[in-house]
Image (cartoon, rainbow, N blue to C red):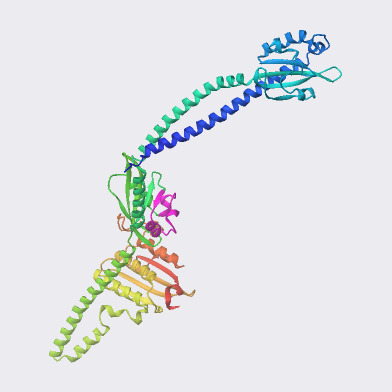
Amino acid sequence: MVKAMTLRTQLVLLQVFIVLAIVLTVGLAAMLMQERQIREASQERMIAVAQSVAQLPTIIDAYDDPDPAAVIQPIAELIRDSSNVAYVVVTDDQGIRYSHPDAERIGERVSTDPSVALSGDMYVGTQTGTLGESWRVKVPVFAVDGTVMGQVSVGILESALREDFLGDITGFLLALGAATVVGVVAATGVARVVRRRIYGLEPDEIRGLLETREATLHGIREGMLALDEHGDVSLCNDSAARLLGLDAPADAIGRPASELLDDLTTLVADSGDDDSTPQRLMLSGERVLVARAAAVRVQERRVGTVVTLMDRTELDHALRDLAGAQSLAEGLRAQQHEFSNTLHTIGGLIELGEFDAAARVIDRAGDGGALSRLDAPDGVQDIELAAILLAKRARARELGVRLDVSGAALPAGPADGDLTTIVGNLIDNALDAAGRGGRVAVTIARDDEGMTVLEISDDGPGVPIEHRGDVFRLGFSTKSDDRQRGYGLTLVARVVERRGGTIDLCPAALGGARFVVRLPVRDLAGAAR
């Protein structure tokens, strides 16, 4: 089996091919240009020589002499030697030579067609004559009256032109060769640098890592964000986009982390303190997320941060339901003991014959205990709201807090999770603030504008005036410095805002804090519409 070519070899060969292609193309173009420039320069020199000879008064006057060659030949040879051309041939109007480098050719007819020059035009081209193939110019010689008396032919041998071209191109070819060598050496260095930058991996290994990364990245349930050293998102998987409320992972790429999650910048900064992975609860819209950040270092240099996001919303709902069920169970156990004591009391009074006293005990116990007091007189008919109020009342009894519920009747309908989120969080805060022996009041009313008003008051210490504007801010809490607090009221505020309502904090008549929530009736009634 033939071993696959390494990436370094491929890069070197590819760059060498590119260098050679460029060098050869440039070299060929340069040689063609050089050859053309040599010809153009030679042509200009020949035209100048030919015209100057054709216009010399001595040459023109010599045409009337009995032996024109005696005058013209010395002048033509002198000009030929000084102008570095192969020949200067002067003829009459019949093509008979008056000058030639070989004196024996004087008096003979030229070997090439002189008709163009004798017709009064200039001829430029390559022809083969007695001296060989040459690049030549032929111009007419005009008499004083303007008639053509003859021609002047000036030429340079093609072999001389090739020799000049090869002489000039040798140095250029050496320069091209040196450039090729430098290009090959540079290509080898570039290949080495590229391979070092990709940690010595081959294409198949890179493809395998990429496929594995993509499968892992988009297959895991937890959200994952990769941030560069400037705090901008460079990678986002599908779960992270879903948790952040984005349409696609690409919507997060290039955006600062602070635009995606509140307080994420602080979490990223904390990840650089040591090798631990700090975590924090955060809100994305109305989702409660657990965010963990870990610094990414390459060769002891921090190149970014990886943030993992886990959705704790469902877990919080389940824990809240479990807490409610536990509170109900504890309340039922307390009620069982209460009714057991009541039955023992009734039995003892009957045995003593105190039937009137037994009847009074039965009447007094007719309410059915703690859990039966949340009925029509309390004005709550919504089944889920009634259930959470029952659970919170049992919880209040456990904490030693008095919980009173009163107000207008709400329409019964299917479960409204937003309403239970609002009521549950606000009552929990009120119970914590009131403490043992305290009191919490829940009032449900309708105002003149058709809004349903929920009021939750307590007799706790209340919220200082300077902090009343901060209670709905993410992470703020007056209870402790615990970072796991400060999310409930923020979540409530976001839910109320989404439902088109308002929430306000003001002092309570009981002495503590009073939260007032105003929601449209149609929203609160939910599916009863």
Q: In the depicted view, which residue is nearer to us: 18 or 354?
A: 18
Q: In the depicted view, which residue is nearer to us: 269 or 139?
A: 139
Point out the stretch of residues depicted in magenta.
Answer: 233-260
Name the quadrant containing residue 128. Answer: top right
Q: Is residue 431 magenta?
A: no
Q: Is residue 259 above or below residue 421?
A: above
Name the quadrant containing residue 374. Answer: bottom left
Q: Is 25 left, or right, of 272 in this rendering?
A: right
Quadrant location of the N terminus in the rendered image: top left
Q: Residue at x 41, y 51 (%)?
A: 258
Name the quadrant containing residue 345. Answer: bottom left
Residue most extreme to the right: 145
Q: In the depicted view, which residue is nearer to us: 307 or 13?
A: 13
Q: Could one spot residue 271 in this view of the protein?
A: no
Q: Is 274 left, or right, of 218 in this rendering?
A: left
**What is the x, y in percent for residue 205?**
34, 45
**What is the x, y in percent for residue 462?**
34, 62
